[in-house]
Image (cartoon, rainbow, N blue to C red):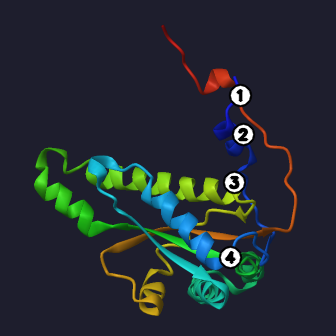
Amino acid sequence: MSSTLIESLKKRRTQYALGKTLPLDKAALTGLIKEAIKHTPSSFNSQSSRAVILFGDESVKFWELTKEALRKIVPAEAFAPTAAKLDSFAAGAGTVLFYEDQDVVQDLQEKFALYADNFPVWSEQAGGMAQFAVWLALTEAGIGASLQHYNPVVDDSVRAAWNVPASWKLRAQMPFGSHEGGFGDKAFMDDAQRFITAG
């Protein structure tokens, strides 16, 4: 059985070698990212996922803020590889910052006290699905990306730089751009270690 979704999943790979040439203009790409997040499922239709979409110099600014935050905690003798990695992300065309709105989570906890402990977990699941949906949409558009996690060290400076609401909790960052490198073969563990089928 063939599936265009499975074929798209197979194409989705982490791309660290990013460039600035994109097949879509900024407006079209912004719309694509918004649609991917908007149509991602969430528990109780909470729609808790949020995003800050940065292009060009604004994306570079994010990675510079990240670099300065890490410079304070990474030993000087080990900083060069960290800086090089961050520069590779800044070399892309943009970055999506993924957030989960904690006001939404807290409101649901109050309204549905029986499930209060679950709502933070369900929020994280919704956020992960939103990240994956955007990554898959970028893949289908021929755009490379990777998923990074430099929160919480950069949270405060990012909040100040782009006036991000205090209730938004930064969960991941996705630098994106043109594919400037290839991919190696992806290894998979044996199915018997991952799956149980019954019935």
Is 43 situated above or below 187? Answer: below
Residue on which the image places disc 4:
25
Nearer the observer, 19 or 71: 19
Q: Sequence order check: which comes first, mark 1 or mark 4?
A: 1
Q: Is residue 187 above or below residue 58?
A: above
Q: Which residue is mark 2?
A: 7
Residue 140's label in the rendered image is 3
Precedes in sequence: disc 1 or disc 3: 1
> Do the residues bearing badges 2 and 1 touch, measured as CB atoms within 8 Å?
yes
Q: Position of residue 131 (x, y in %)?
A: 53, 58
Mark before the other along the chain sequence, 2 or 1: 1
Pointer 1: what residue? Answer: 2
Name the amino acid type tagged 4: Asp
Task: Give SS at disc 3.
Answer: helix
Mark 3 belongs to which amino acid? Glu
Tell which circle, 2 or 4, labels the residue nearer the N-terminal end.
Answer: 2
